[in-house]
Amino acid sequence: MSAFTEPTFAWEPVTPRGVAAFARASLERLLIVQGIFALFAAASVVWILSDGIFPTIDATINELPDQGQIRSGTLDWHDKSPLLLAEGNILACSVDLEHGGALRSPADFQFEFGRGSVRVFSLFGETEFDYPPGYIMAANRPDLRPVWGAWSPDILALAAIGTFLGLMLTWALLATIYFLPVWLICFFTNRDLNFRQSWRLAGAALMPGALLLSLAIVLYDFGAFDLVQLCFAFGMHLVIGWIYLFVSPMFLRRRLPAEKKNPFSSK
């Protein structure tokens, strides 16, 4: 007898018992529920872009001068320097032609545009990228504003589609990797599960972690989480998947012992 009652209907992959139910469910049901959770994740990405990052980019473009460009790897700047263009909780943009360090923002990520490079400051350190030589790029409000206005909705759409498809493909790949450990757990604990059912259980076990990370992204945008807590949530969403992989099989029924024949029976 199993220590737990095996679930009979797969509808929620939030509890270990709910994850276990997907082992007996159809592939179509698993994909539908995974699609719903992937939509939640895509919505969280679109939310943080549209609410936490894009407004700062809009404000940055509005503060650019009427003339300016990056030509041959050099920023041609027609305004004062250093200058803080725009600042939010997540992103800040500034200009310091000499990278003198006069402006430091409390935002989690600061892009500082210098004469020949852009520096990115964050919790993870400082990174510098040179402007690409041989290209001419606009660095003024009249040119960038219509371009950004035209591309920003497309960027949001691509982010949503990329997040959705990326999660669905990643879950399929990880389920292909994790199904064998799930089957081995069931084998050594005498659980009734075949390879296909193990694959479906492994796929369902990855959804609770994705839900946690989606909520963490939204909380990060609201300011309830800082960058450190968001990174912790990212690590935990991986650990939660592994925990569900080990715990959920315990909610499956055990194999019934084979019926033994009575050696003294006449039949």
Image (cartoon, rainbow, N blue to C red):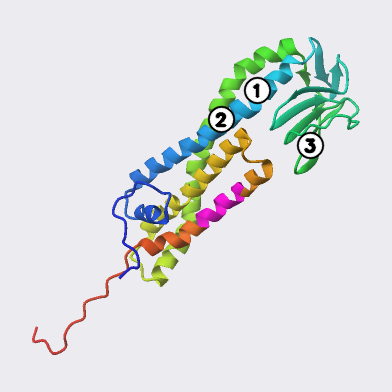
Disc number for residue 121: 3
Q: Is residue 121 magenta?
A: no
Q: Is residue 96 left or right of residue 172?
A: right
Residue 193 lies in quadrant:
bottom left
Q: Mark 1 is on which residue type?
A: Pro
Q: In which quadrant is the N terminus drawn?
A: bottom left
Q: Which residue is mark 2?
A: 47
Q: Residues within 10 Å of mark 2 (few under 14, many from 20)?
A: some
Query: Pointer 3 and pointer 2: residues touching (CB < 8 Å)?
Result: no
Lower sequence index among marks 1 and 3: 1
Residue 128 visible in the displayed image: yes
Label 2: which secondary element = helix
Q: Position of residue 42 (x, y in %)?
A: 51, 34
Give the residue furthest to the front.
224
Specify start and end residues of the magenta stretch as a single range: 233-242
Q: Is residue 267 left or right of residue 50?
A: left
- Work out whether residue 28 or residue 61 is closer to the camera in this orientation and state it: 61
Q: Earlier in the sequence, mark 3 or mark 2?
A: 2
Quadrant showing the C terminus = bottom left
